Amino acid sequence: MTPMSSRGWRALQRPVAGVAIARRPLQPTRRCLRAFATEATLDGELKPSNYGQPLFQSHPHLLRPHELTPGIPVEEYEQRRRLLMENLSNDSIVVSIAAPIKYMSGNIFYKFRQASDFWYLTGFEEPDAAVILEKTSTSRGYRMTLFSNGKDSLKEKWEGARTSFNDALSIFKADDARSIQSFPSQLKSLASLYSNTYIDIPNSASKRSPRTAKSLLRYLSPPVQPKSEYETVVESLSASRRHDLAPHVAKLRAIKSEREQQVMRAAADMSGRSLAKANLLTMPKTADADGHSSFTDHAIYLPWDIRKCNRSSF
């Protein structure tokens, strides 16, 4: 197809007899083309992000330097792990597993929510991940191995960015970062070296089945190793050497740090302001016979400035 000449373009803009033209055609300027698009840069680097979750390096408007999650610095996650290991007996390891992706139907998945205990100890927000903490006699008190999917350029085009193993070491302060593929074999070898294994299955496991180590087989989804290897790992976790991790993490979570209190206050303030503004903008339906109307009898329309979460206040 040959390009249209300037004379032909002007001819198309001329009024046609008997046809009312509302306005002149818009010229295709760069400003017009970018009207409904966003373009974000950070130190000359274009999005998408190189990380599997918002970090200061990719989202400086949401997090401050040294924060791993909004309002919580990386040092606090380090302190949580250290306090946990100090409260456990010697010759112990901790195994915590990330939440899996849950699907509505087929390939349609729900919005991902990380397992609470795993997130509390690591701040890592990606699925198909695990962490092993080994109690040691070093000044740190433990050794941390973080398992994740790592970078995969092909899958990241469809599933979003992932955190690399090198970033897991530098940002999340792991001593070792490995593929989730190696998690079963690593757990098998470490379980045989320690007398106490503290393991917890996230709350999304079936409530009809007891919390046993064999639930681990169903929780690593999709399976990354043959099922027979998982069964070998489970057999190594005998009942006498296996302990529930949840009560120990719950003791730490019961007492909130100053940073956690600040985040809770900020969340409460945002919720209160949004609710108050929603009440002012409420559009009531027909009033009740007595002249009273309840909050549930209103058709509430929340504009975007209320619904958006201003997380920068954290």
Image: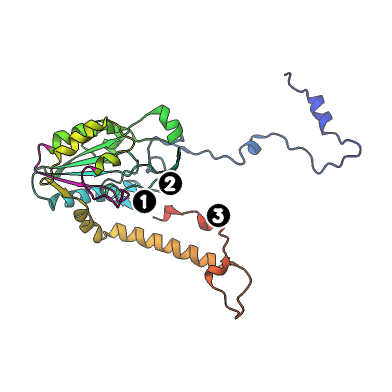
Q: 10 Å neighbourhood of mark 1: few (<14), some, or many (≥20)?
A: some
Q: Is residue 290 above or below residue 130?
A: below
Q: Look at mark 3 in the image and give the residue it sits on.
A: 304
Report the amino acid beneath label 3. Answer: Trp
Q: Quadrant of residue 285?
A: bottom right
Please report the bounds of the magenta region as a residue range: 192-214
Left or right: residue 27 compared with residue 234: right
Which numbered dot is residue 180?
A: none
The residue drawn where x is 34% and y is 40% is: 127
In this view, the mark in front (3 or 1): 3
Determine the residue located farthest toward the right in the rendered image: 17
Q: Do labels 3 and 1 touch, CB within 8 Å? A: no
Q: Quadrant of residue 183?
A: top left
Mark 1, secondary structure of its residue: loop
Q: Look at mark 1 in the image and give the residue it sits on.
A: 70
Measured as percent of width and height from the top left, residue 142 is found at 15, 43
Q: 10 Å neighbourhood of mark 2: few (<14), some, or many (≥20)?
A: few
Measured as percent of width and height from the top left, residue 181 is found at 27, 31
